[in-house]
Image (cartoon, rainbow, N blue to C red):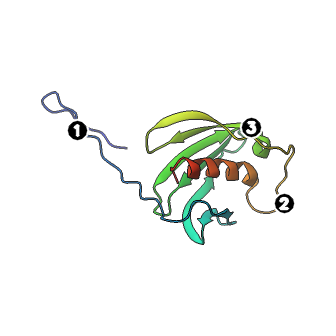
Amino acid sequence: MFTFIARNGKAAPAAKVEYVLVQRDRSWPLDFREAGTIEQQSKLIGNYRDVTPNGSNVDYYEISLPSGLMVAKVNFKEGNDSQVCEITTMKDNLKRAVPTPSKERNVKVLMGDRNLEVVKRIVKWLVDNRYL
């Protein structure tokens, strides 16, 4: 946490963060690994991490670039059956409700992340909108 002290009535300038996205062909399919990594065109483009508190009825995830720079914080209800999620993007500090429609209901994941199917839909939105 940073604390800025105003001098002469002026606040310190905001720190500028450079989001350097991995260069690749975005038309390639996304590949999700059990370790929480996201690849496209055989290149590591980001990571996802489940940060849901124990006992919560809302799921929370963080999506980051390979450098570790946070791209988005996401929350949703209903696990893989979620039809909408709340995404806060760090690049522009915007919070929005994003549709994550699924044609299937009661999706269960046998291996890997318990919410992998909805995470895939969220990451696709982030890629399509040039956040990842």
Q: Quadrant of residue 29 in the image?
A: bottom right
Amino acid of disc 3: Gln
From the image, state whether disc 3 or disc 1 is nearer to you: 3
> Sequence order check: which comes first, mark 3 or mark 1?
1
Q: Residue furthest top?
A: 9
Direction from residue 13 to residue 109 in the image, left or right: right
Foreground residue, 31 or 68?
Answer: 31
Up-down: is 26 above or below 9?
A: below
Estimate the x, y position of residue 35 in percent, counting from the top left: 65, 66
> Sequence order check: which comes first, mark 2 or mark 3?
3
Direction from residue 31 to residue 21 in the image, left or right: left
Q: Quadrant of the N terminus?
A: top left
Direction from residue 89 to residue 18 in the image, left or right: left
Amino acid of disc 1: Ala
Amino acid of disc 2: Leu
Q: Secondary structure at mark 2?
A: loop
Residue at mark 3: 83
Query: Can the viewer see residue 41 in this picture?
Result: yes
Residue at mark 2: 110
Estimate the x, y position of residue 32 in percent, counting from the top left: 67, 63
Disc 1 versus disc 2: distance between alpha carbons? Answer: 50 Å
Mark carried by residue 12: 1
Direction from residue 21 to residue 73 in the image, left or right: right
Disc 2 versus disc 3: distance between alpha carbons? Answer: 21 Å
Q: Quadrant of residue 14 in the image?
A: top left
Q: Secondary structure at mark 3?
A: loop
> Sequence order check: which comes first, mark 1 or mark 2?
1
